[in-house]
Protein backbone atom coordinates (compact mmCIF):
# COMPACT_ATOMS: atom_id res chain seq x y z
CA UNK A 1 0.00 0.00 0.00
CA UNK A 2 1.41 3.38 -0.95
CA UNK A 3 1.62 6.33 1.39
CA UNK A 4 -0.93 8.26 -0.70
CA UNK A 5 -3.34 5.32 -0.63
CA UNK A 6 -3.00 5.07 3.16
CA UNK A 7 -3.62 8.77 3.53
CA UNK A 8 -6.79 8.58 1.43
CA UNK A 9 -8.07 5.60 3.39
CA UNK A 10 -7.44 7.41 6.68
CA UNK A 11 -9.21 10.54 5.42
CA UNK A 12 -12.19 8.54 4.18
CA UNK A 13 -12.45 6.68 7.49
CA UNK A 14 -12.32 9.93 9.45
CA UNK A 15 -15.04 11.54 7.32
CA UNK A 16 -17.25 8.48 7.78
CA UNK A 17 -16.79 8.60 11.54
CA UNK A 18 -17.50 12.33 11.57
CA UNK A 19 -20.92 11.63 10.07
CA UNK A 20 -21.67 9.51 13.13
CA UNK A 21 -20.30 11.71 15.93
CA UNK A 22 -18.20 14.77 16.77
CA UNK A 23 -14.42 14.93 16.44
CA UNK A 24 -13.84 14.97 20.20
CA UNK A 25 -15.50 11.54 20.47
CA UNK A 26 -13.30 9.86 17.81
CA UNK A 27 -10.05 8.13 18.70
CA UNK A 28 -7.06 7.58 16.46
CA UNK A 29 -7.41 3.85 17.06
CA UNK A 30 -10.94 3.93 15.64
CA UNK A 31 -9.77 5.82 12.56
CA UNK A 32 -6.93 3.43 11.70
CA UNK A 33 -9.09 0.39 12.41
CA UNK A 34 -11.83 1.66 10.11
CA UNK A 35 -9.24 2.57 7.46
CA UNK A 36 -7.63 -0.86 7.69
CA UNK A 37 -4.14 0.53 8.17
CA UNK A 38 -1.62 0.23 10.97
CA UNK A 39 -1.09 2.92 13.56
CA UNK A 40 2.39 3.47 12.08
CA UNK A 41 0.81 4.25 8.71
CA UNK A 42 -1.15 7.03 10.39
CA UNK A 43 2.08 8.76 11.42
CA UNK A 44 3.70 8.24 8.03
CA UNK A 45 0.72 9.54 6.03
Image (spheres, rainbow, N blue to C red):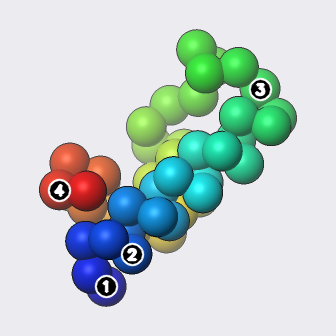
First reached walking from the N terminus: tag 2 or tag 3? 2
Q: Position of residue 9 (x, y in %)?
A: 50, 65
Please name the residue that numbered disc 2 is placed on.
5
Q: Which residue is mark 4?
A: 44
Rendering coords of residue 35 (x, y %): 53, 63
| Measured Cα–Cα span from mark 3 to mark 1 | 28 Å
Q: In the figure, 5 relative to 14: above or below?
A: below
- Drawn side of residue 37 relative to residue 20, left or right: left
Q: Marks 2/1: CA distance?
A: 6 Å
Mark with earlier residue (4, 3): 3
Q: What residue is shown with label 3?
A: 21
- Estimate the spatial distance between the alpha carbons at disc 2 and disc 4, rounded to whole Å: 12 Å
Determine crowd level at label 1: few under 14, some 14-19, many 20+ residues with C-alpha closer than 10 A. Answer: few
Question: Label 2: few (<14), some or many (≥20) within 10 Å?
Answer: few
| Numbered label attached to residue 1 | 1
- Of callouts 2 and 4, the N-terminal one: 2
Q: Nearer the viewer, residue 42 or 33?
A: 42
Q: Earlier in the sequence, mark 1 or mark 4?
A: 1
| Secondary structure under the numbered disc 4 in the rendered image | helix
Of callouts 3 and 1, the N-terminal one = 1
- Residue 7 x/y as whole percent: 38, 61
Q: Find out whether the residues at labels 3 and 1 contact each other: C-beta distance under 8 Å.
A: no
Left-right relation of 42 to 37: left
Cβ–Cβ below 8 Å for labels 2 and 1?
yes
Query: How far apart are labels 4 and 3 at the CA level?
Result: 26 Å
Crowding near the residue tagged with mark 3, few <14, some 14–19, many ≥20 C-alpha atoms within 10 Å: few
Amino acid sequence: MTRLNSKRRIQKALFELLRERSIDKITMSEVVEKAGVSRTSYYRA
